[in-house]
Amino acid sequence: MSAFTIWPEDVAWRPVSPKLLWLELISLAIAVLWIVVPSLVVWLFWPSWVPPAVGATAVVVGVVRAALLPRVIRSWGYAERADDLLVRHGRIVHRLSIVPYGRMQFVDVTAGPIERAFGLATVQMHTAAAASNARVPGLDPQEAARLRDRLTALGHAHAEGL
Amino acid sequence: MTAPDAARPEPPPLPSAPPVSGAGPQPRQRLHPLTPLLRSFRMIALAVAAISWQGYSNLGTRRWLLAVAAILVVTLVGSAVSWLTTGYHIVDQELRSYEGLLNRRTRAIPLARLQSVEVVRSALARLCGLAELRLEVVGGAKTEAPLAFLTVGQATALRAQLLAAASAARGAPAAAVDTEVDADVAPVEERLLHRVSNRDLVISQLLRPQWWFVPVAAIMPILFFAADGSISFVGLASTLTAVVGVLVAPVRTVLGDWGFTAAMDADGLRIRRGALETRSQTVPVGRVQAVTVTWPWLWRSRGWVRVKMDIAGSTVSAEESERTGTLLPVGTVPAARELIAETLPGFELTSVSIALAPRRARWLSPVAYKILGYGRTEHAFVVQQGVITRELTAVSLARVQSVRVRQGPLERRLGLASVFVDLAGGRSVAAWHRDVNEARELANDLAAQARTARAAHP
């Protein structure tokens, strides 16, 4: 990584499951189809260059995004420090969240239908600030449960008001 | 309380029971019997106006009277039913409120989560000697559970009781609770911090850019008249509407902040204001999470600033928050400094030094890079921004929820990054475009500093 990175290197980053890539590819394909199919339907009734152009743009954007996805997935990471949870992600815009355990209000573990098919889950730690954004996708269910239990335990140990 | 003694403005029966938990459940209290009438007053007036407008001539006086009587009877019966089914009481450390006959709703508000209690008196309520109590709760999206209406004495006593119970529930020292219980009987000892002169208030609101619109609006119809030789009613009316619409904000501020006083009492910061609708708001000092000082461009010649505060939990609608959070509607920097020192203890407005963004940030913010900056004190994180309207926001480190760092592709090119500090209720402040290493250190330091600040002031 370049010298300009905002992500600290002196902590033990844990990666997310590589299976997240397939999940993200499927969601991306669905999103692209949501644009391509209607634009083809519209084209049947309105023979103009506009609908195919919209569809083609969607496909191109989808392909570019798909090509970037492996690196995006690798950019996800989380680290449990003594007093806070670090979450990093983003390939184009780099993001880092530092969320103290003491500020945790509750922890969500969610698994959508596609996530379940891949055996993955998402853990999200909520604080009173909506912007905190401590969300970690693509975790094995055991790891998700472990992280949740650990966060809850740490949250109790550090419990504070607002 | 029951209907007969509600008519007399006597001290309420509440303070007799100790407000601290363990006293056993209190009986359920009712709101003032005039409540439903006051609430539906507008509806009744509208309905009557509608019939009169539509069919006074068609109906004839007798049938018109009958219709009005019918409306009154229906609303009165509805009011009586809703009054009978609405109530509240304090159980353990919760305020419970009940309402509705068909759609029953019970709401329990844990007093430990109570942020501030406000006594609001609309013009109509003042005529009847009544008041409304608004409670603000942590994480609540809006002002929750308004208790409307109570007699003024009842409202004040309940306010004191709720605040006392709230600080007891939070584990405040017992001595503080005792003084607050006494305060129910004796008038509260308070220390006046600042009073805003109404003259300054009016001048400050005249110095808002909205007024520049007035001459333009006055000239427009004249120009049209000169061009057309005639003037249309619609044109005139729409100009008038636009003028009124633009001027509502400053006029409302003048009325809302009329006679603004800030005082400190045992419960916290007490703010009173309002010409038509008087409001008295109490903010427990520890609940202020940020203070924003604004220097509007037109006020600079007078050296005036405006100060707002962010209270954890009071994230009301945009318009409402503009008023609920005012700490100083207009005042000099020394006055602002004094008030802020009381609300964010340990923060000196004039002594904070601001580190500006590096010069290469001009590629991202060509004008604002000279202003963007941040500063740090032991208890606060300070952020400066705004070219025309300069703004300084001080965040209490003990109230920081999380810290984030963000780096866009251009920022990465330039070796910059931005640091965000998140507060409860969706507010974030940012130190934009800092050097990467500085940003990393800043984020780490802020997280650590916030931790020690929290440990010191839980």
Image (cartoon, coloured by chain):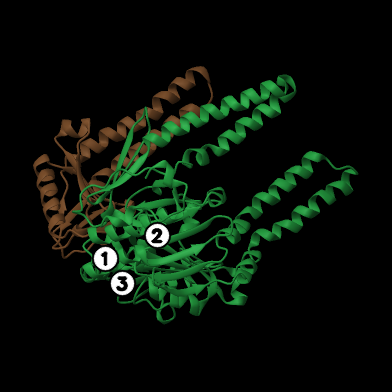
Chain colours: A brown, B green
Residue type pointed to by label 3: Glu
Q: Residues within 10 Å of mark 1 (few under 14, many from 20)?
A: many
Q: CA distance from mark 2 to mark 1?
A: 55 Å
Mark identifier at residue B438: 3
Q: Nearer the viewer, mark 2 or mark 1?
A: 1
* Residue B320 horizontal side relative to residue B404, left or right: right
- Chain ID at mark 2: B
* Image quadrant in which you'd find residue B237: top right
Quarter placement of the C terminus of chain B: bottom left
* Residue B17 horizontal side relative to residue B241, left or right: left
Q: Picture coordinates of residue B157 (x, y %)?
A: 37, 57
Q: Is residue B83 visible?
A: yes
* Image quadrant in which you'd find residue B186: bottom left
- Chain ID at mark 3: B
Residue type pointed to by label 1: Val
Q: Picture coordinates of residue B448 (x, y %)?
A: 22, 69
Q: CA distance from mark 3 to mark 2?
A: 17 Å
Q: Residues within 10 Å of mark 2 (few under 14, many from 20)?
A: some
Residue located beneath label 1 in the image: B177
* Image quadrant in which you'd find residue A101: bottom left
Q: Residue furthest bottom?
A: B351
Residue type pointed to by label 2: Leu
Residue located beneath label 2 in the image: B410
- Earlier sequence position, callout 2 versus callout 1: 1
Q: CA distance from mark 1 to mark 3?
A: 45 Å
